[in-house]
Amino acid sequence: MKKTILILAAILMMAGYTNQIFAQSTVTGTTAGAKIIVPLTLSQTSVLHMGTMSVLASTPGTCILSTTNTRTTTGGVQLSTMAPLSTNAAYHVIGEPLYDYAIVLPATVIVIAGGGQTMSINTLKARPVSKAVDGLIGSLSGTGTDDFSVGGTLHVSAAQ
């Protein structure tokens, strides 16, 4: 009998505590919010072209195209003024006004030349118009736009 009374008392005490634990008061005047931003879009406005050049039969070299479309060479590469001329890859960015964006460039791009020979372009660099220096972070204007150019180093084998 004592056991039954103790068990009943324990059950009643638990029921009493349970009601107090789950009791909640009403809250009024709660607000919530959200901000929807403009998705980032990217469109290419110009392709990367290293321009016309020649290379010595016995000496490989490079053609370096800066992000401001200035070409320099090393080794056996010699520049030509014949068409096609060099152009930086150029991109137009649209997104949320006054936000920053990051540019991710590949380590190497493989170019297939005439006859199936390959060349590589590496040391790729970007220049956002908003920053006016080479870098991988750009800032969208008050209207949500920016542009950036890309340059790099083309490796040319001897007699290619």
Image (cartoon, rainbow, N blue to C red):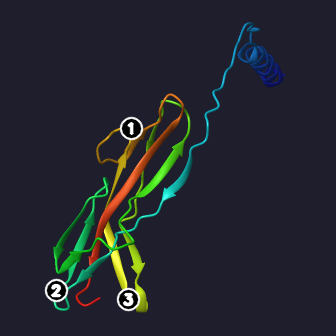
Residue tagged by mark 2? 59
Q: CA distance from mark 3 to mark 1?
A: 38 Å
Q: Residue at x 71, y 12 (%)?
A: 30
Dot label at residue 118: none
Q: CA distance from mark 2 to mark 1?
A: 40 Å
Residue tagged by mark 3? 117
Label 1 residue SS: loop
Image height of 79 relative to 48, above or below:
below
Q: Is residue 131 left or right of residue 30?
A: left
Q: Nearer the viewer, residue 13 or 99?
A: 99
- Count all numbered tags in the image, as a single digit: 3
Q: Residue at x 77, y 14 (%)?
A: 16
Residue 54 placement (x, y as % from top left): 26, 81
Dot label at residue 130: 1
Badges 3 and 1: C-beta atoms under 8 Å apart? no
Answer few, some or many: residues within 10 Å of disc 1's Cα (few below 14, many 20 plus, some between 14 and 19).
Answer: some
Quadrant of the snapshot with the N terminus: top right
Disc nearer the start of the sequence (2/3): 2
Q: Nearer the viewer, residue 107 or 70?
A: 70
Q: Is residue 20 left or right of residue 152?
A: right
What amino acid is found at the position of numbered circle 2 in the picture? Thr
Residue 36 placement (x, y as % from top left): 65, 31
Residue 70 placement (x, y as % from top left): 26, 59
